[in-house]
Amino acid sequence: MPRRLRVSNEFGDWVVEVSGDRVSIPAANVEFHIRAGADGRIHLEDPDGELTGTAARAGGTIWSAVEGDVFASRVQDAAAGATTAGRGHELLASPMPATVVRVAVRPGDRVSAGDTLMVLEAMKMELPIRAPRDATVAAVHCVEGQLVQPDQNLVDLT
């Protein structure tokens, strides 16, 4: 069964269905396949051809660069309506294999929306992990210098 996600960006708001390497946007009658390249790039294939780009996730936002254009898309589970672990509790995960280069918060710290919680480095790029909302840091699950994997929980916010 496909996973249904709500994606919002400057072009609109859609429900996207993801099943394995297949992604479809039913309302737009669009379907494509995603393939990860050995170079860390993402390849999007549809009947019209192939696009190549990169993507990184910071909280509930996915930053993507495709063919020279950069997009910021807000992503959440279409059924649950949020990326949370319980009422008022949010988990921030690593978007890709990366090294933690700076941790700027400790458990108990109050943060505001947009504050940098930590900085990751991947593919020679720095990726700040920012607070998606005003919150309190409940836990930090990594240390500077640590290699983290995709979807590994980095910070819990309450």
Image: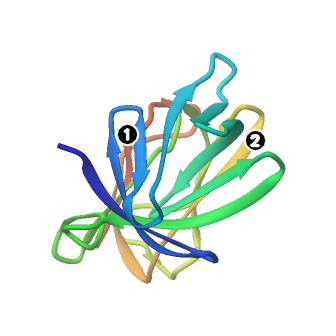
x 23%, y 77%: residue: 88
- Which picture quadrant has residue 149? top left
Q: Mark 1 points at which residue?
A: 152
Q: Is residue 126 or residue 30 the one in the foreground? A: 30
Q: Position of residue 68 (x, y in %)?
A: 84, 50
Amino acid type, label 2: Met
Q: Position of residue 34 (x, y in %)?
A: 51, 34
Give above or below for 131 relative to 100: below
Position of residue 25 in the picture relative to residue 10 (left or right): left
Question: Most extreme residue toward the right, as rendered?
Answer: 68
Cβ atoms under marks 2 and 1 closer than 8 Å: no
Amino acid type, label 1: Gln
Q: Name the residue under label 2.
A: 125
Q: Quick one: label 1, few (<14), some, or many (20+) residues within 10 Å?
A: some
Query: Which of pointers 2 and 1 lies earlier in the amino acid sequence?
Result: 2
Q: Is residue 94 or residue 157 the one in the foreground? A: 94
Q: Is residue 57 or residue 146 the one in the foreground? A: 57
x 43%, y 41%: residue: 142
**Helix, strand or loop for disc 1:** loop
Position of residue 68 in the picture relative to residue 89 (left or right): right
Q: Where is residue 28 in the image (x, y as percent from the top left)?
A: 47, 64
- On-image quarter of the N terminus: top left
- Which picture quadrant has residue 104? bottom right
